[in-house]
Image: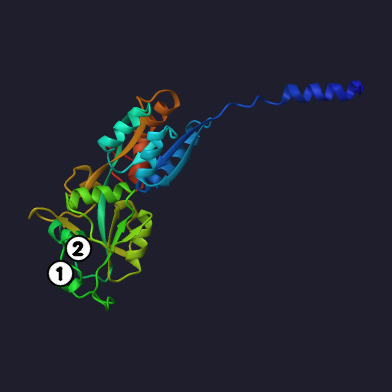
């Protein structure tokens, strides 16, 4: 047995007494929609300043990924840019989960064109001709235009992967019961869609308004013969834009404890100003500095 001298023993005791106790940290798993991933990350980072003992682990992968995690019980909050399907809710309940829906904002799903494309307006009927399986528009000349830099005249149709809520919502809103045409370029993320359209003169793609930049143009969209409406935060708020949609977070049951505190903060003026500054529409009217 080793004998510790009195000065050393005194130093060790003093050290233990002065070391602050390690504070337990809660980590909330937040997964899903690529449309929401940027604002979800912004929420998580800002919330760390409000409640440092609660960490929010944010990841994307698409609405389908988040919903699957909710069904499997491996996530605290699932982000989705579409509603859960009835069959998904039933599957979750069968596994002991009880998904509860929370609307955390609104988005205008914009149709992006290359900046050289002369088209400024598109109707739902034209979008069906471009994106629909039964559509006849395969060349830009079919729509009566010539796109500078698009020598082939072929329309490069850019879409999202089928686990994306954006993919599902666009299909339901624009194509109805129709199916997507074959041969679309299905991108993993919203930013990927805009990047491809920016660098491809022949391309058209759809994505969340928050991913717009000055290097692409957004079409004014009309439905059923009505006047076209430009995608914007105000037209998403009043739902006058025909491809506006709610953005969701799902929890297992009514939120409690740290999950409830976090969702309450997201829906507060502070949280809603963050989503507004990221290019989405808040759930309520807020004044942001």
- Mark 1 falls on what kind of element? helix
- How many neighbours does mark 1 have within 10 angstroms: few (below 14), some (14-19), or many (20 or more)? some
In this view, the residue in front, 273 or 104, is: 104
The quadrant of the picture occupied by the N terminus is top right
Which of the two labelled residues, at mark 2 and mark 1, occupies the earlier sequence position? 2
Side of 272 relative to 226 (left or right): right
Q: Are marks 2 and 1 in contact (CB under 8 Å)?
A: yes
Q: How many marks?
A: 2
Would you name the residue on which mark 1 appears? 143
Rendered image quadrant of residue 132 = bottom left
- For marks 2 and 1, give the CA distance: 9 Å
In this view, the residue in front, 61 or 103, is: 61
Which residue appears farthest toward the left when viewing the image? Answer: 225
Rendered image quadrant of residue 122 = bottom left
In this view, the residue in front, 133 or 210, is: 133
- Mark 2 falls on what kind of element? helix
- How many neighbours does mark 2 have within 10 angstroms: few (below 14), some (14-19), or many (20 or more)? many
């Amino acid at each position: 047995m080793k004998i510790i001298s009195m000065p050393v023993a005194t130093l060790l005791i003093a050290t233990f007494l002065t070391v602050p106790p390690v504070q337990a940290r809660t980590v909330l798993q937040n997964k899903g929609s690529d449309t929401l991933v940027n604002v979800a990350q912004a929420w998580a980072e800002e919330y760390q300043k409000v409640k440092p003992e609660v960490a929010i682990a944010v990841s994307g992968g698409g609405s389908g990924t988040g919903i699957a995690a909710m069904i499997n019980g491996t996530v605290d909050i699932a982000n989705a840019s579409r509603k859960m399907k009835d069959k998904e809710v039933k599957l979750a309940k069968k596994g002991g989960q009880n998904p509860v829906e929370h609307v955390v904002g609104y988005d205008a799903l914009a149709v992006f064109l290359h900046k050289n494309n002369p088209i400024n307006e598109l109707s739902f009927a034209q979008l069906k001709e471009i994106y629909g399986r039964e559509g006849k528009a395969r060349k830009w000349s079919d729509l009566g235009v010539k796109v500078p830099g698009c020598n082939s005249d072929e329309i490069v149709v850019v879409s999202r992967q089928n686990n994306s809520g954006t993919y599902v919502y666009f299909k339901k809103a624009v194509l109805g019961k129709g199916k997507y045409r074959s041969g679309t370029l299905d991108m993993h993320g919203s930013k990927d869609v805009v990047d491809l359209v920016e660098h491809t003169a022949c391309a058209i793609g759809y994505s969340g308004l928050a991913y717009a930049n000055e290097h692409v143009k957004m079409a004014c969209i009309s439905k059923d013969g009505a006047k076209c409406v430009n995608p914007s935060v105000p037209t998403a708020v009043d739902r006058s834009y025909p491809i506006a949609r709610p953005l969701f977070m799902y929890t297992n049951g009514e939120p409690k404890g740290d999950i409830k505190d976090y969702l309450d903060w997201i829906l507060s003026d502070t949280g809603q100003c963050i989503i507004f500054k990221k290019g989405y529409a808040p759930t309520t009217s807020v004044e942001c500095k």
